[in-house]
Image (spheres, grey):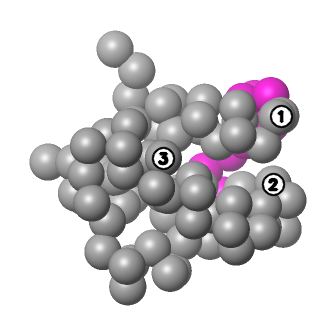
Amino acid sequence: MKTVEERIVAFVADYCGIPASDIKPESHLVEDLGMDSLDVVETTLSIEEQFEITLPLEETDTFNTVADLIAAVEKHAR
C-alpha cells in the first residue's frame, strides 16, 4: 500500500504532467510546479475526494508546498 506522500506526489505529478521523481515535499506548488490558484483549489478538492476527507478552508488557503498537502491529509485522515 502506498503512503500518503506517495499518493499525493503521484497525483500532483499526474495533474501537472511531470514525472513524480521531479516532485519533492519541499516543491512549491506555484513557483516550482507552475500551478495557479485554481489549480491548487482543484488539486485540494481532488485530494479530499481521493482520501474521503474534508479540509478546513482556513487551512487550504495556506497550502504552498507539497509537504503542506501531505501534512494536512495526514492530520485529517485519522
Is any part of residue 55 visible from this angle? yes
Kindly identify the amino acid type of the residue bearing the numbered disc 1. Answer: Ile
Q: Residue at x 59, y 35 (%)?
A: 11
Q: Can you say whether 43 is above or below 15 in the image?
A: below
Q: Residue at x 78, y 61 (%)?
A: 35
Secondary structure state at the residue bearing disc 1: loop
Crowd around label 3: few <14 · some 14–19 · many ≥20 (10 Å) = few
Measured Cα–Cα span from mark 1 to mark 3: 18 Å
- Kindly indicate the quadrant of the structure image that contains residue 2: top left
Please say whether residue 65 is visible from this viewpoint.
no
Mark 2, residue position? 33
Residue located farthest toward the bottom when viewing the structure as drawn = 58
As displayed, is residue 15 above or below residue 45?
A: above
* Magenta stretch secondary structure, dominant: loop
Left or right of residue 71, residue 76 in this image: left
Task: Give me the disc on residue 18.
Answer: 1
Q: Secondary structure at mark 2?
A: loop
Q: CA distance from mark 2 to mark 3?
A: 17 Å
| Gap between marks 1 and 2 measured at Cα | 9 Å
What kind of residue is marked 2? Leu
Instruction: Give the structural element (helix, strand or loop) at label 3.
Output: helix
Q: Judge the density around disc 1: few (<14), some (14-19), many (≥20) Cα neighbours within 10 Å.
A: few
Q: Which residues are magenta?
A: 19-26
Nearer to us of marks 2 and 3 is: 3
Graded by Cα atoms within 10 Å as few (under 14), some (14 to 19) or many (20 or more), the crowding at tag 2 reads some
The one of 64 and 38 positioned closer to us in this rendering: 38
Mark 3 = which residue? 46
Quarter of the rendering occupied by the N terminus: top left
Mark whose residue sits in front, 1 or 3: 3
Farthest residue toward the top? 1
